[in-house]
Image (cartoon, grey):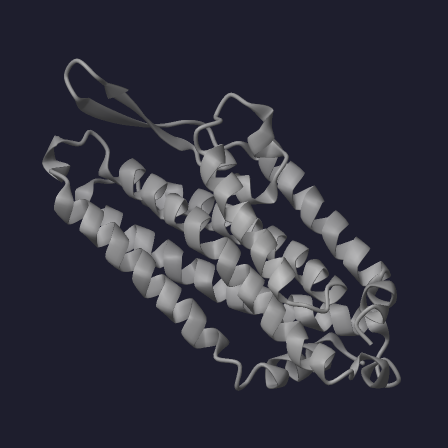
Amino acid sequence: MSKKTEFTLEMRKLRRRHIPLLFLMVFVLITAWTYWCIDDLDVSSLNDVSAMVFTNLLLMNTILCPIVMAALASRMCDMEQMGNTYKWLCTMQKPEHIYRGKVMAGSFYILLFTLMQTVLFWIISQPYGAGVVSRLPGYFTTILLTSLCIFILQLNLSLKFTNQLTPIFISIGGTFTGLFSWFLNRWPLRYLIPWGYYASLCNAGYNYDETTRYTTYYWDMYPFLWMAVLTAAIIILYRHGQKHFLETVRETI
């Protein structure tokens, strides 16, 4: 069976699962939050508005995306688990092909969501100064790789547990650890958890002067080393899930 067919089959399964609506709602929420931040702050006093927008967008992704990725993975698996259809599907497709189709379908939604956010970052930041275009690849890469890693992890968990509440609760815990990682910029813990990579790959930062009460934003070099580590983690998680698909679903059938 071709990859195109695998992808098409998974997309057909998701037709009435309201996945596009889920991503659209989150995108609207992120957009509203960002514009509220700009409206609430005196942006004329900021030295770099694009760095502020960059940081706030990634912070919102840390809060919302783990739950979204868990919901996406759960919606892909719950119908087949409740219907005990994995054994039947495996008579027509190789297990690794079923898994690959799910990853491709999820990656498609994540890619569209990332593109929408990248355009949003450009639209919001562009009026406040030049040089925003050079920041777009970093933002795109951070959202795409981190969300994809979390999605594949959640997919593996959703295939392992019959009760889909378990992966959801894990994602909630991941959200809190991801938020906590924003305050661990000098600790290695943020590099050991996938939910922390929205912060780990953020190359914008700020310094707050308590005396003047002035916040200075700045840009660092993009952390290519940790991008490579995250990419390796995605490959490992994918190969593990593909290789052990039969073992993980036997508990659900």
Q: Position of residue 204 (x, y in %)?
A: 38, 33
Of 19 and 218, the residue lying toward us: 19
At 82% from the left edge and 64% from the top edge, which residue is drawn? 248
Q: Relative to 175, is 53 on the left or the right?
A: left
Question: From this viewpoint, which residue is outermost toward the top?
Answer: 211
Of 16 and 54, the residue lying toward us: 16
Q: Relative to 161, is 123 on the left or the right?
A: left
Which image quadrant for residue 98? bottom right
Q: Position of residue 202 (x, y in %)?
A: 44, 36
Q: Position of residue 54 (x, y in %)?
A: 34, 42
Q: Relative to 237, is 12 on the left or the right?
A: left
Of 232 and 99, the residue lying toward us: 99
At 40% from the left edge and 45% from the top edge, which residue is drawn? 58
Which image quadrant for residue 190? top right
Res 198 seen here: no
Q: Position of residue 231 (x, y in %)?
A: 65, 45
At 68% from the left edge and 71% from the top edge, which residue is drawn? 102
The quadrant of the rendering that contains the N terminus is bottom right
Is 205 drawn above or below residue 74 in the view shown? above
How many numbered markers are drawn?
0
The quadrant of the rendering that contains the C terminus is bottom right
Res 224 seen here: yes
At 26% from the left edge and 22% from the top edge, which residue is drawn? 208
Of 142 and 214, the residue lying toward us: 214
